Amino acid sequence: MQIDLNGVIENVLQRPCSHFDERPDEGDISLLVIHNISLPAGQFGTPYVDALFMGAVDCKAHPSFCELEGLRVSAHCFIKRTGEVIQYVPFNKRAWHAGQSEFAGQAACNNFSIGIELEGTDTTPYTQAQYASLHNVTNAILKRYPLINTQRIVGHCDIAPGRKTDPGDSFNWPAYISRLEQVI
């Protein structure tokens, strides 16, 4: 897996998304944030996550979606339970995934981070296919963006404590990180 000079992963599905903008400093991509998402909560394989990131979610499709009305969010990538990777925002652009956040004293993590969403919940184990794809994407990111290292890979819970809990207790951090350290 390779990332081109525009921050696009070669040979993965690219979906048009308008929920992004320019980074203040494209040379400061220095953090990777792991998230989870499912819509409706706890349901997998639905079209709603894709629709949310594309700005086209039907807020009447499920009672819980009323809170999504007018929400403009995105992620750089979404990894489905099957391991399929979809890229919505080139890594060189600022996706809107972190919200109010801070890492190592630096606020507004969207400015300098890459956000990857895993289809899942805090309590449902992620699939081996997801971990395999996440490892491939992460290794490509580590090669392309040298300011990111294994100490600068965090969960959404780490940059927005008290507000966010993902990727949750179900995410196997030791196995994920140790496998990256073997590759680097």
Image (cartoon, rainbow, N blue to C red):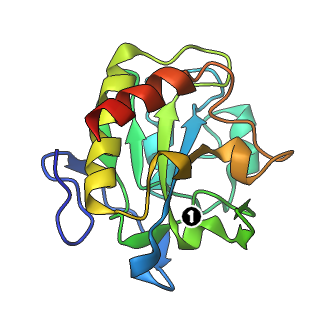
Instruction: Say which of 21 and 128 sits in front.
Output: 128
Above/below status of 49 relative to 25: above
Which residue lies under the disc numbered 1? 96
- Residue 46 visible at all: no
**Residue 15 in the image, given as x and y percentages of width and height:** 30, 54
Residue drawn at the location 72% of the way across and 71% of the way down: 107
Describe the element under mark 1 as helix, strand or loop: loop
Q: Is residue 134 left or right of residue 55?
A: left
Can you tell which quarter of the image residue 61 is in? top right
**Residue 149 in the image, given as x and y percentages of width and height:** 44, 52
Residue drawn at the location 49% of the way across and 18% of the way down: 126
Residue drawn at the location 39% of the way across and 79% of the way down: 27
Instruction: Say which of 47 and 137 sits in front.
Output: 137
Quadrant location of the N terminus? top left
Quadrant location of the C terminus? top left
**Residue 108 in the image, given as x and y percentages of width and height:** 67, 71
Above/below status of 39 relative to 60: above
* Mark 1 residue crowding within 10 angstroms, few (<14) / some (14–19) / many (20+): many
**Residue 177 in the image, given as x and y percentages of width and height:** 46, 32
- Residue 41 visible at all: yes
Instruction: Say which of 114 and 74 sits in front.
Output: 114
